[in-house]
Amino acid sequence: MAYSRGPVQRQSEYGVPSGQADMPPSANLFQDTSGALSYPPMMAQQLMSNPMMTTAAMHYGQELTSRGQVVVEQNINRFVAISGLKTYFAVDTKYVLQKLSIVLCPYMHRNWAPMYQSEQQVPPREDINAPDLYIPVMSFVTYVLLTGLVLGTQQRFSPEQLGITASSLLAWLLVEVLVIWLCLYLLAVSSQLRWLDIVAYSGYKYVSMIVSVVASLIGGEYRAVYYIAMGWTAIGIAYFMIQSLRLSIQPHVSEGASKLRNYFLLLVALLQPVMMAWLTYGLVFYQPITQKAP
């Protein structure tokens, strides 16, 4: 019984069908192989459509995220306690308005004693005498933007100037905090102040600086407006610092300890007007350099 065979294709000497023998060798490199790659995407779709696999993947992702958050918080807590840092921003509108009025006009305020609960200071929104970081941070940003406005009126604004101003303010703030902390150590004055408290109190002067610079813009060529605003706010911030810090500083029981505390308070009080004048005078009374004609 004979079996019929299909059409026989002749092969070339290279072992390929004759129909493809005339094709260039590079044509085989561009054959459609999409059918061979269709299995992995199909498999992935089947896995994702499985409710158990989807739930397991979501659970693993949440667990990985929580572990990463714990690691980040542990590393940050080495330097700053996150829970303690949040307390400095626990403010409301009433607190901000009252605090600004006390910073600019502290003479009417009577009770300067901070409130404590379980040996910890209460949040600022519950105690007007508690230091906060909301007002210093916002006044810092406002002063940087105000500096850009002043530079624009003087025809010397550039975007780089905002970064330079912010860096300069941060550098001088760091120097001021280090000086105050060093004085506390050298004078052997014990206090309940934390370093964030010192940063907060040192940042309140930005409010006074904003008022002084705005007064100079309003006064224009009349420098007396700037001097009056600077004098008022400088005396006010010095008085504010003395009243705010004197109840938080408790010197050791030793001879002359009270004098050391008074010297420290005087130093901090005088440091605020000096820093205010140093940071604002060159900005307000800028004099362009004119080249003399030969």
Image (spheres, helix red, strand yellow):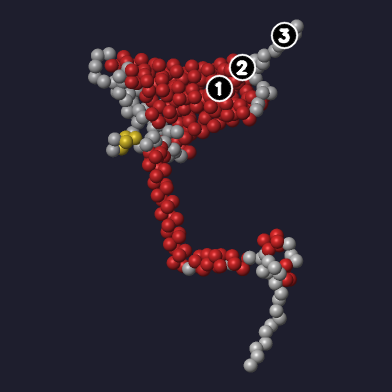
Q: Residues within 10 Å of mark 1 (few under 14, many from 20)?
A: many
The answer to whether residue 69 of the structure is visible from this angle is yes
Q: Residues within 10 Å of mark 3 (few under 14, many from 20)?
A: few
Local SS, label 1: helix
Local SS, label 3: loop
Q: Nearer the viewer, residue 41 or 181?
A: 41
Q: Nearer the viewer, residue 117 or 62?
A: 62
Q: CA distance from mark 2 to mark 3?
A: 21 Å
- Location of residue 272 in the rendering, given as x and y in whole percent from the top left corner: 46, 20
The answer to whether residue 87 of the structure is visible from this angle is no
Residue at 40% across, 42% down: 73
Local SS, label 2: loop
Q: Which residue is mark 2?
A: 285
Q: Which residue is mark 1?
A: 212
Residue at 73% across, 71% down: 19
Residue at 64% across, 24% down: 151
Q: The C terminus lies in which quarter of the figure?
A: top right
Q: Nearer the viewer, residue 142 or 108?
A: 142
Q: Which residue is mark 3?
A: 292
Residue at 74% across, 65% down: 23
Contact flag, marks 2 and 1 (Cβ < 8 Å) = no
Amino acid at circle 2: Phe
Q: Is residue 25 left or right of residue 91?
A: right
Q: The N terminus lies in which quarter of the figure?
A: bottom right
Q: CA distance from mark 2 to mark 1?
A: 12 Å
